Amino acid sequence: MKIKNFDLSVISFTNMKLYLNPIIKSGLILILFTLLGCNKNEDSQHKSWKDYGGGPDQSKYVDLNQIDKSNVKDLEVAWFYPTGDNKIYQFNPIIANNHMYVLAKNNSLVALNATTGEEIWIHANLSGITRRGINYWESKDGKDKRLIFQINSYLQAIDATTGKSILSFGENGLVDLRQGLGRDPNSFSRVQSATPGKIFEDLILLGSSPGEQYSSPPGYLRAFNVVTGKLEWTFHTVPQPGEYGYDTWPKDAYKYVGGVNTWGEISIDEERGIAYYPLGSPTYDYYGADRLGSNLFGNCILALDARTGKRIWHFQTVHHDIWDYDLTAAPQLITVKHDGKKIDAVAVASKNGFMFVFNRVTGEPLWPIEERPVLPSKIAGEQAWPTQPFPTVVPPISKQEMKKEDLSLVFLSAEERKEWEQKLDSAEIGFYTPLSNKNSTLAIPGAVGGVNWGMTAANPGKGMVYVISMNYPSFYEKLMTLDEIQEKNNSMRVARGNSLLYQQNCATCHGQNREGIAGPALVNLGQRMNMNDFKRILFSGRGDMPSYSHLKTEELEDLYNFLSGLNQNQTTRNNEETQVPTGPVIEVGGAPGGLEQRKVENSGGRYGAPYPEGVKIDHERLYMYQWGLEYPYIINPPWSEIMAYDLNKGEIKWKRALGEDPDANKLGFKNTGLMRAQRNGMIVTSSGLIFSTSKDGKIYAFDADNGEELWSATLPTGSEGLPAMYEENNKQYLVITATTPVRVGKNADEINDGKEPQGGYVVYALPNK
């Protein structure tokens, strides 16, 4: 039985209260929802890998059992497709009709034969395309097959069979995603997320990454028609006057507050037509004097009717977030046995280290969630929310406390430990401790601790959720005024003037030595990227990185020269247009005009645009100079773990370190996990296996029942992003994107054994009989 197109916007679960209209109180809607789930074929969507994350529910689960516990040790490389460049790809391949779609050859979209790796077609030079994946859609009659993706903050479509742009989509092949956000579209350059969104019926559901500066655009949730490109609905994540949640903000907040965006992974209950969005924090991430209130729908798990965009229910996991505790990992849709009943649930893992579990129809928690008092802010004008929600039964996914005795015995000398003990004595410490404008602050989890995108998976029918987590603290300097930041910048001038640009704009995420922290390593950048691509990325922003459109052309060139170590002649050569790759190229550059530089005015750069006319804010803006990510090594291992939650019982069934740090191993430490390991992913199989990539450059297979390692293989180079699994011609395949330098140890040193590794897509299978 299927019932469609009824109004579901009647359920709201906020601050531990469930508000129901009279219809729901009578139980009728709950009965309808129960009926909707009765006839579903639990594994029908898990036979292939046509979606980012495997299927609509983002479970990374496959109902394939050719590879099992008894033979996984026999896996071997079936074929390898080199990317033909030195770029880092986080791309999750998708497979449909024996076509595997990948990014390679300088951001070209390539269709491969999924059984042989042979090139079918290449759509070249799609610089700025969503780097973690794309979307596949086909019509009910199978005649229209499309690849839909974001690029340069446009939405575009390509024919999945021919590889050619579909110019009937949008306006001459383009849908401008900067339009419709309630802000001047020329005041910002970037809105697209690095994750691809999600297909539901004839819609593509999109989140966004509009930046994290003051006055950045809001992260409205939108759905577009996959055939026409028409905007079908919009949900205002920063509510406007008259909308639910408007009273949780200052009256003019919708005019200037940004963020509250889904930059991570959307999950869909196809049978019920419900989309689950993990939402991030409002801007500015660490100081909220201009957004007093609880700030709905910031940091919410939000259930929307996928057809209409109407709100069904929500739960806010952090009130008035001032710690950057975004929700980003895919909500996991599972069925559990709870209090003697079968319940369709959703499990939400967070950067703050919690696992929240709800009835996915009503939003009611399966176990109590308490509002507990937390510390107030010491900054004049800031009003930290007085309580925060704490799950009472389900254990945390990561550490939420750090004391002096937790200081690392691995990579800190006795002298360094003493120095850090003194730092901790003078710092603000404690879970949910607001940042200070007087002192440093230690937060654990930090800004990229706990769980990030790609790091959740499930066996949906068994109520099992699998999580990769990180024990990664942030040590924040004090919040500063703009004058204090400028003074600090001036004091940091070094011999090479253009390295100041790097310190001001890049070092926070890419590291003082360019080895990579939250962002990728930039060592030897000139070997992986030409200047034109570099300029385009900095102008538009990409993924979690904001736009740097405020930098002048000569500043961008100076910064590129500094990162590449090139002289002027080399710079000129690398400034040439990207060459068309070899192979069956059928088109170059996407829809006409889609790669042209966007006009940007008055963006304010990294410090944010001014408040709109008529808006008066009494408090001076405060900023974070560094994001506190430089010190993952100060805490004892394990730094990264993989674990299994049995959510029938609300307990962790098993957990273990994920990967080994060879530098720590040499010092006699085992079961260490890896630092800076926020870009790994999993696959769960019906045969009882968990496959996981790891920061140490390996792919592992674990027993899903107990976490025992059953197999591992060393990749040609490291991997970021999600693996994929599929079956073609009665043969099961595992594909890994391996294009990332392996960097380990305290200083994220690269491991290459003196060889230049060749990146590509590694495909494993069992030997032919």
Image (cartoon, rainbow, N blue to C red):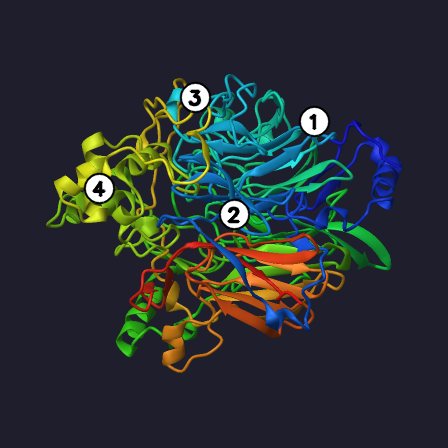
Q: How crowded is mark 2: few (under 14 residues within 10 Å), some or many (20 or more)?
A: some
Query: Along the polypeptide, which appears first: circle 4 or circle 1?
Result: 1
**Whether residue 196 is situated above or below residue 550 in the rendered picture:** below
Query: Along the polypeptide, which appears first: circle 3 or circle 2?
Result: 2
**Distance of mark 3 from mark 2, alpha carbons?**
28 Å
- As drawn, the residue found furthest toward the bottom would be 668
Q: Mark 3 points at which residue?
A: 592
User: What amino acid does circle 1 point to?
Assistant: Thr
- 442 vs 315, left or right, is left
Q: Name the residue under label 4.
A: 559
Res 632 quadrant in image = bottom left
**Label 2: which secondary element:** loop
Q: Which of marks 3 and 4 is in front?
A: 3
- Label of residue 118 in the image: 2
Q: Mark 1 points at which residue?
A: 308
* Most foreground residue, 142 or 223: 142
